[in-house]
Amino acid sequence: MKVILISIDTLRSDHLGCYGHNYTKNPVSPFMDSLAEKGVVFEKHYATDVPTPPSYTSMFFGTRAIKNGIYTFNQYEREFTCSTPSLAEHFYKEGHRTGMISNLSLIYPWLHRGFIDIHKPGNRFQGGTAEEVTEEALRWLREFGKKDFFLFVHYWDPHVPYLERSRKEYRKLFSPDEYRDRAPNMRYINDNPELEKAYQEKHKRMNDPYEPEKNLALYDANIRYVDDGIRRLFEGSAKLGINNDEILFVITSDHGEAFGEYGFWDHFSCYRNISQVPLIIFGPGVKKGRAATYTQHVDILPTLCELAGIKTESTLCGKSMTDLLQGKQDGFREEIVTESAFVAIQRMYVRDEYALVHTLFRKERDHINDYELFDLRKDPDQVQDISEKKADLTRDLRIAMDDWVTREAGGAAFDKLRHMAYEREHSNVGFLLSK
C-alpha cells in the first residue's frame, strides 16, 4: 500500500474552502478543495491534544497525552511513556519504506520512530518553505515511490511569523479589507493592560502587524502558498510515473490558530479555533462524501493500519474510521475531549455541539471562568459563556468530563493536568505571556 500523510502546521479547518471559507475574492485552497471532492471530508475532526508536540504524538501513536505523557513543549524523551509502536513502525514492520519530510525530530526524537529516511527542510525546527518541502518529497518519491511506502510530509508556512513566511505574489491575492467584518473583537486584549502589552511585544518581535485583519490576510496567503505546493507534489509525482490513484492521501494539521479571539493569539488554548482541524482522506477504498460525526487524531493510526491490513493493539485510545470512509455515519463518537497545557491549561469536552471548557490555569486572563459552556452552532468562536443560563446542562457535562477523567486517568488524583496547573500556579511563569 502507498500512503502519504500531509500535515499543514497551524491550519484551522474554517480557512479551507471545503470547510466553508468563501468570503475572499480569491480562493484560499482551490487545489485542496478539488481533492476533498474525491474523498471524505471530516466535518468535526479535533486534535486530541494541542499544541504541536502532544498533537503529533497522539497522531503518530494513537494515544492521548493522559496516557503517553507528552502534554506540552520542553519535555524530554524519558517522559514519553507509550510502549506501543508508532504509525511509521507499523508500516515499516510490514515491509513499507517509510519517510519523513519534517524537522520535528530535531526537538522531539520519539516522533521519528519507525522512519527509515528523515529529511529536515531548512535544517532547523519550524524551518523549510513549501517549495523546499515539496522538492524533498518528490526527491524521495523518485527513489521509493514505485513500491509500498508510508511518507509523512510536513508544511510549516501558516505558522508565525506570518509576514516573514509570506510571498509577495501571494500577499497580493488577499486584502485585509476582506477580513474587517470577520476579524475578532480585541476587547479582551485591549481591556487588559498586561495582555495588551504581551500581544504588542510578541507581534513586534515577530515583525507581524497588530491588526488581526492584516494577520488573517497574511495567514490565508500562506495557506494558498502551501496549496500550490501540494498541487506541485501531485503533478510532480505523476510525472515520476507514480499513479496517484493508487495512493491513499491524508491531509490534516496539528492545531489551528487564534488572532485575538477571547484574548488569545497563536495556538495556546484548546478552544475550537485551535483544536478543530481539517481531515481529508481520499484514495483506494474511500467513498467520497462528508462525515458529520466527531473524530480525533488518535483515530488516524488505527484507520490507516486497518486499510493496510495491519493489526494494532487493543490499548490504543483511537479507533478505526474505515466505516466512515464507506459512508456509514452512525455509532462512532458521541463526544470528544481535547487538552492544552502550555499557556492556558485546559480541557474541553464536546457533545452535541456544546463545549464545556475547564480552565485549570489562565495566567492574567481574568475574564475566563473555571468552567465555561459554549454553543458551537451559535458561537463557534466561543466568546459567549452560557454556563449560568444552562446550569443543568453544565452540571451534566461536568459529570461526564469527570467520568472521562476517571476512565482515562484513574481519577482526579492522577490527573496530570491538575498537577501541572498546581505547579504553574506556584512558580514564576511570567515568561508565558510573551509566547
Image (spheres, rainbow, N blue to C red):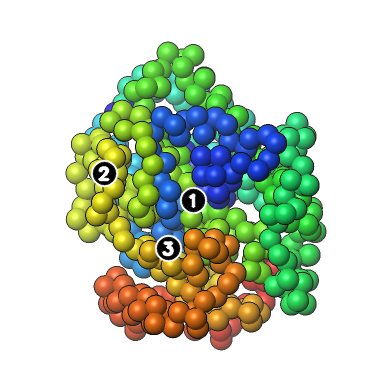
- The image shows residue 309 at horizontal and vertical percentages of 20, 36
Element at label 3: loop
Task: Classify 342 as above or below 220.
Answer: below
- The image shows residue 209 at horizontal and vertical percentages of 79, 54
Where's the N terminus, which quadrant? top left
Q: Amino acid at mark 1?
A: Val
State the residue at coordinates (49%, 51%).
Answer: 277
Task: Classify 366 as above or below 376.
Answer: below
Q: Which mark is residue 204?
A: none
Q: Amino acid at mark 2?
A: Lys
User: Which residue is the site of mark 1?
Assistant: 277
3D distance between C-alphas at marks 1 and 3:
15 Å
State the residue at coordinates (52%, 19%).
Answer: 236
User: Which residue is the site of mark 3?
Assistant: 353
Q: Quadrant of residue 249?
A: top left
Q: Nearer the viewer, residue 255 or 93?
A: 255
